[in-house]
Image (cartoon, coloured by chain):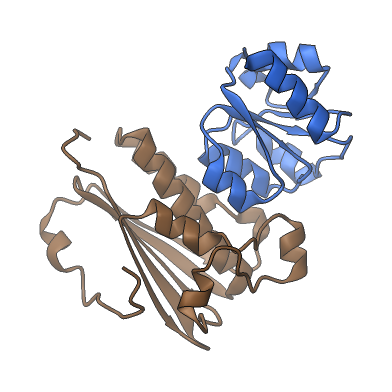
Amino acid sequence: MNLAELAEKLSLKVLTYSEGLERNISGCYVSDMLSDVMANSRKDEIWITIQTHSNILAVASLKNLSGIIIVNKREVDEETLKKAASEHVTIFSSDLTAFEAAGRIYKLIR
Amino acid sequence: MIDGKKEKSGKGESSSSCILIENSCEIIGGDFSRAGEASMRLKKELTGLGIHEDIINRAGTAAFEAEMNVIIHAAAGWMRYTVTPEKLRIIVEDMGPGIQDIALAMKDGYSTAPEWVKQMGWGAGMGLPNIKKNSDEFNIDTVVGEGTSLEIIINILKGEEI
């Protein structure tokens, strides 16, 4: 499944780098601890978090994650939105909770 | 592996090997907006060399955690790295508070980061253990009140081509 299909199925709003929507997702990682994501996430996973500051871009980029879903209707920092395109990171926002979003993704790709 | 002693007196054995990349980047303490710049530059350069992605992943993780430690705890620091066909050597040095108790700092979950840093999702006490996990060799040299120097070595050649 790619990000575009996922966005459609979960009604995600694309906030940044729509050029990346063709990218495939291999799984999902849910965490708000950035070191935990650095340690345990895997390439091409989509990351669910409520962290919105610009450090999430470096994490997603260094770990080759397919994208980030900001849940709970959280607003993303202006600086993060501005930098996302140059870091090639696709960010989505969602009204869902982390539990709901992860649950739906699990059903879709497992 | 972590002996807290300074063992580097020059580059020693690795200096005879062909150097593919040698670079350094400044890290400004407290500047979270530029966090990851040094590590992403390293990643880009390693990618350019066609190094295996598992090694790049380990290097990126170790470098970023070390970079974050400087940003969180120190006034300033720098990252230097040298890549030869055999190994990647990353040195991250800072002018920071130093580490009081290395064994304690290496313990998973132990953190001295302030609360607001924890709110950002950092300071989980996973940084140094993460670095160690991703290194083939890891040395900490620290003086309380002066600073810390980390040496991270990742072997590139394990019978594989670059």
Please tell me in which quadrant of the rendered image residue B119 appears. Answer: bottom right
Residue at position x 40%, y 48% in the image:
B59
| Residue A35 in view | yes
Q: Is residue B141 left or right of residue B158?
A: right
Image chain in blue: A
Q: Colour of chain B?
A: brown
Q: Position of residue A3 (x, y in %)?
A: 66, 17
Please tell me in which quadrant of the rendered image residue B139 appears. Answer: bottom left
The image shows a total of numbered marks equal to 0
| Residue B83 in view | no
Residue nearer the viewer, A92 or A80: A92
Residue nearer the viewer, B83 or A86: B83
Give the position of the N terminus of chain B as an image quadrant.
bottom left
Q: Answer above or below: position of A73 versus B1.
A: above
Please tell me in which quadrant of the rendered image residue A87 appears. Answer: top right
Give the position of the C terminus of chain B as an image quadrant.
top left
Residue at position x 50%, y 82% in the image:
B101
Q: Position of residue A27 (x, y in %)?
A: 60, 25
Q: Position of residue B137 (x, y in %)?
A: 30, 60
Residue at position x 76%, y 25% in the image:
A103
Q: Which residue in the rendered view is the most extreme toward the bottom?
A: B145
Q: Is residue B154 left or right of residue A3?
A: left
Q: Answer above or below: position of B46 versus B27.
A: above
Residue nearer the viewer, A83 or B136: B136
Q: Answer above or below: position of A18 versus B81.
A: above
Residue at position x 55%, y 68% in the image:
B70
Q: Position of residue A4 (x, y in %)?
A: 69, 13
